[in-house]
Structure formats: C-alpha cells, structure tokens
C-alpha cells in the first residue's frame, strides 16, 4: 500500500513540475478543444484524441495547466502504452 502512495505522489510531483513549465511559457502550447489536453503549439492534431481545433490563448493554457497539474491523470497517454 505504501508503494502505491509513493508512486502516486511521484506522479503528482511530475505533473506539477510539467504544469509549472507550461505556465512559465504558455506561448509554446495550446489546449485541444476536443479533449482539453495541452499540446505543443506546433502540433497539427492532438496526439490524444486526434482533434484539430485548439485554443492558444495564453490565459487558457495557464488555467488548463494549473487544473491538470493539480489532479491525477484521468486519461491514458502515449507513455502509458510503452
């Protein structure tokens, strides 16, 4: 049980760190309008849902990064399959 807690804690720390990186440079990212994932600004389609509509407003990116960085992952990512 302790191992599970430690792993979850590490994952949350990792998510918070990535969120801080995004908040520091929101112009490098955009939010997918389909699944609300944050992707690199140069992405043409979302790697999670294959959507192609994005919101690149810096405040939207910041708000989404803070939200996603403060909660556990709720969707599978490409990394989950490796």
Image (cartoon, helix red, strand yellow):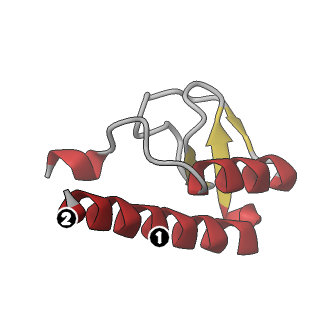
Number of marks present in the image shown: 2
What label does residue 3 carry, if any?
2
Name which of mark 2 and mark 1 comes first in the sequence.
Answer: 2
Q: CA distance from mark 2 to mark 1?
A: 15 Å
Where 33 sits versus 80, above or below?
A: above
**For mark 1, what is the residue?**
13
Q: Nearer the viewer, residue 55 or 20?
A: 20
What label does residue 33 carry, if any?
none
Where residue 76 sits in the image (x, y, percent)?
32, 38
Which residue: 39% across, 65% down? 9
Left or right of 2, for residue 5: right
Which residue: 65% across, 29% down? 33
Q: Nearer the viewer, residue 52 or 21?
A: 21
Q: Is residue 73 visible?
A: yes
Q: Secondary structure at mark 1?
A: helix
Where 55 sits versus 25, above or below?
A: above
Q: Label 1: few (<14), some or many (≥20) within 10 Å?
A: some
Which residue: 60% across, 55% down? 70
Where residue 19 sits in the image (x, y, percent)?
61, 64
């Amino acid at each position: 049980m302790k191992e599970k807690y430690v792993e979850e804690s590490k994952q949350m720390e990792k998510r918070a760190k990535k969120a801080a990186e995004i908040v520091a440079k929101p112009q490098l990212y955009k939010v997918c309008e389909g699944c609300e994932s944050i992707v690199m600004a140069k992405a043409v389609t979302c790697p999670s849902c294959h959507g192609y509509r994005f919101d690149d407003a810096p405040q939207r990116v910041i708000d989404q990064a803070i939200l996603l960085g403060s909660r556990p992952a709720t969707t599978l990512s490409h990394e989950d399959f490796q």
